[in-house]
Image (cartoon, rainbow, N blue to C red):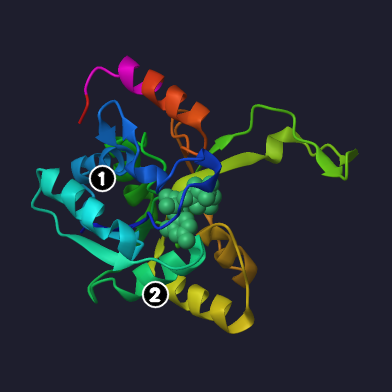
């Protein structure tokens, strides 16, 4: 049994300050999105990949797809105005046989195939999960510029993707969000609002999200340390 993967890639990368979608920027000679796709392709657990993009990026995305050496189906799906809307569209485009879905941000291009495999294995035993790592910094809750709380770090984890869910449950959660006007920044938050359990799968310290120019430099450093490029 295998799972389906949706990759939100329909952002604009405002914080990167580039003139186009940050996922098209080059990282060691390859577009960021290509790194993400190559890791997903190398994961045995993933049988089908859907990529949500904006129509103005379609031709660049298709060029990347052509460079990939795979027999796995890769579908282009129209993204939405927000990440949540992009995932919603992706869920509507899943093949009917899909029972487990992973969502993984195109911008997390350093996730390894092993992480995808481990996530799918866990999802076979749970309704929903997120990859996450324990927080290393002391986190402050601030109002204006005044600290109002210092939560116990033992209970704080930094959320990553992949996040994964039983597909019918996530579809229902997204429909409910549209109905009730919920706006969230990740899919787990919808499960939490409904009261469905979401487990932690231990993520990877190097699984960073490329957000700024600095992240791009760190990603390059990490990739150079790796012995193999998939
Ligand atoms: N994303 C998406 N649809 C949107 C917005 C974002 O599919 N309408 C995707 C991005 O392409 C990215 C992931 O969601 O892979 C995480 O979003 P983020 O890192 O915030 O990317 P951007 O929204 O592109 O960047 P920024 O917020 O700096 O503009
Ligand atoms: Mg964004």
**Would you place residue 28 above or below residue 30 in this image?**
above
Quadrant showing the C terminus: top left
- Residue 47 at x, y = what percent? 19, 56
In reply to whether residue 147 is colored magenta, the answer given is no
Q: Nearer the viewer, residue 97 or 103?
A: 103
Q: Which label's residue is closer to the chain start, 2 or 1?
A: 1
At a point 57% along the width and 66% down the height, the residue shown is 190
- Residue 52 at x, y = what percent? 34, 61
Mark 2 vs mark 1, CA separation in Å: 24 Å
**Few, some or many C-alpha atoms within 10 Å of disc 1 (few <14, some 14-19, many ≥20)?**
many
- Residue 60 at x, y = what percent? 24, 51
At a point 63% along the width and 78% down the height, the residue shown is 181
**Few, some or many C-alpha atoms within 10 Å of disc 2 (few <14, some 14-19, many ≥20)?**
few
In this rendering, would 153 be left or right of 3?
right
At a point 43% along the width and 71% down the height, the residue shown is 88
Judged by depth in the image, the label closer to the viewer, 2 or 1, is 1
Q: Which residue is the site of mark 2?
A: 168
**Would you place residue 23 above or below residue 207 in this image?**
below
Verify CB contact (< 8 Å) between mark 2 and mark 1: no
In reply to whether residue 223 is colored magenta, the answer given is yes
Q: Nearer the viewer, residue 92 or 164?
A: 92
Magenta-colored span: 222-228
Q: Secondary structure at mark 2?
A: helix
Res. 27 in view: yes
User: In this view, which residue lies farthest toward the front?
Assistant: 19
Q: Which residue is the site of mark 1?
A: 37
Disc number for residue 163: none
Q: Nearer the viewer, residue 130 or 185?
A: 185
At a point 28% along the width and 71% down the height, the residue shown is 94
Q: Secondary structure at mark 1?
A: helix
Q: Nearer the viewer, residue 207 or 11?
A: 11
In this rendering, would 204 be left or right of 68?
right
């Amino acid at each position: 049994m295998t799972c389906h993967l949706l990759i939100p890639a329909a952002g604009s990368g405002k914080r990167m300050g580039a003139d186009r979608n940050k996922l098209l920027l080059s990282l060691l000679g390859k577009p960021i999105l290509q790194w993400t796709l190559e890791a997903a392709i190398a994961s045995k657990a993933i049988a089908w990949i859907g990529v949500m993009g904006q129509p103005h990026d379609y031709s660049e995305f298709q060029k990347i797809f052509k460079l990939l050496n795979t027999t796995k189906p890769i579908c282009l799906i129209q993204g939405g105005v927000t990440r949540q809307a992009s995932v919603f569209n992706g869920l509507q485009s899943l093949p009917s046989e899909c029972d487990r879905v992973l969502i993984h941000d195109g911008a997390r291009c350093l996730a390894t195939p092993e992480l995808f495999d481990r996530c799918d294995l866990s999802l076979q035993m749970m309704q929903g999960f997120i990859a996450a790592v324990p927080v290393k910094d002391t986190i402050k809750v601030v109002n204006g510029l005044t600290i109002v709380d210092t939560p116990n770090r033992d209970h704080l984890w930094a959320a990553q993707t992949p996040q994964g869910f039983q597909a019918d449950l996530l579809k229902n959660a997204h429909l409910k969000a549209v109905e009730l006007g919920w706006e969230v920044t990740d899919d787990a938050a919808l499960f939490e609002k409904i009261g469905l359990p979401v487990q932690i799968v231990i993520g990877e310290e190097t699984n960073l999200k490329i957000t700024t120019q600095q992240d791009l430099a760190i990603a390059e450093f990490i990739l150079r340390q790796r012995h193999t490029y998939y």
